[in-house]
Amino acid sequence: MSRALTGPTKTARAAAVESSATIRTVRARLLRPAGRAVVYLLLIGGSAAYGFPFAWMIRSSLMSIDQFYDDPPPLFPTEPRWENYAEVWNTGPVLAWIINSSIVTFLGVVVLTFVSALVAFGFARTYYPLRDVLFILVISTMMLPGHVTIIPKVIIFRDVGWLDTLLPLTVPMIGGSAFFIFILRQFFRTIPRELDDAAEIDGASRLRVMFTIIFPLSKPALATVAVFSFITNWNDFFEPFIYLNTPERMTLAVGVRFFQAGLYDQPQLHLQMGISIIAVTPILVAFFFAQKQFIRGIALTGMKG
């Protein structure tokens, strides 16, 4: 009797399982468009929220100063004033600011990235006494705010005659960055050490291993550090504002404030928005071309102790 029930029971169970799988498949097909729609709505909403300030800045840069004080202010400029950008360019030494910012940023990208990579390689791929202790000391410097050390640095730079020059912004880059050293060191540790051993067996020196193996395999992390360095140095306001006094020697970030209090009795909001557009454009362009390496470097960094 039990054997007679075995066949139909198995058939019923198989049918039930098949029916359940069919229901799940149909449900997944029905929910998949709805899920995608929700995801797209969230992405569109987030993009609109983050892009609204930039759109508002573009809108404001094309308005006249009188339209800022209208009640209510217009949502869009009635007559876009493209001449605002020409007025920005002719009013202040914008070209000198761009050149100064470019010098500081270029040296920051090249010098900070290279020096930080050298130090990170020493912490990640070599052995020597007190290596981990030195690494902890380097990382601990990130806990010290820059505002605490600004007065001693101003005194030092004043005594050596570097104030009102770009030297206080560029020479300290020779020491590297603790944050960049940490990022690169964590990435270097994810690369198999057998590659080093194989290269050293073939007679490669440590420097050759670093330049021909480690660095080529670390392009995502190096690109991430370079983008971070570019954004940090291009947007830096605090230290250039402290060190630089002559308008022609200012950086672009400090020059934005120049339109607020440097030339006029009242803030020229439309000109401030115009110079802000000029200041933020290089960052958008740099991130657009480096976003793939940047995101990949962030995803792959820091996964190994």
Image: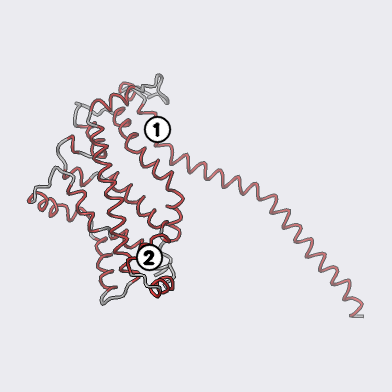
* Image quarter in which the C terminus is found: bottom left
Left or right for 205, reference 90: right
The image position of residue 189, as x and y in percent, is 39, 68
Q: Quadrant of residue 83?
A: top left
Circle 1 is placed at which residue position?
Answer: 56
- Amino acid type of the residue that numbered disc 1 sits on in the rendered structure: Trp
Quick one: 303 or 40, which is closer to the camera? 303
Circle 2 is placed at which residue position?
Answer: 186
* Image quarter in which the N terminus is found: bottom right
Compared to 51, does 26 lie above or below?
below
Compared to 52, does 236 lie above or below?
below
Left or right for 197, reference 262: right
Compared to 224, does 100 lie above or below?
above
Identify the residue at image location x=89%, y=76%.
Answer: 5
The image position of residue 141, as x and y in percent, is 24, 62
Identify the residue at image location x=75%, y=61%.
Answer: 21
Q: Disc 1 to disc 2, how far (Cα)? A: 40 Å
Left or right for 151, reference 184: left
The image position of residue 11, as x and y in percent, is 86, 69
The image position of residue 192, as x and y in percent, is 44, 70
Quick one: 108 or 29, which is closer to the camera? 108
Quick one: 92 or 39, which is closer to the camera? 92
In what element is the residue under mark 2?
helix
Quick one: 82 or 14, which is closer to the camera? 82
Question: Mark 1 Cα within 10 Å, few/some/many (few <14, many 20+)?
Answer: few
Question: Mark 2 Cα within 10 Å, few/some/many (few <14, many 20+)?
Answer: many
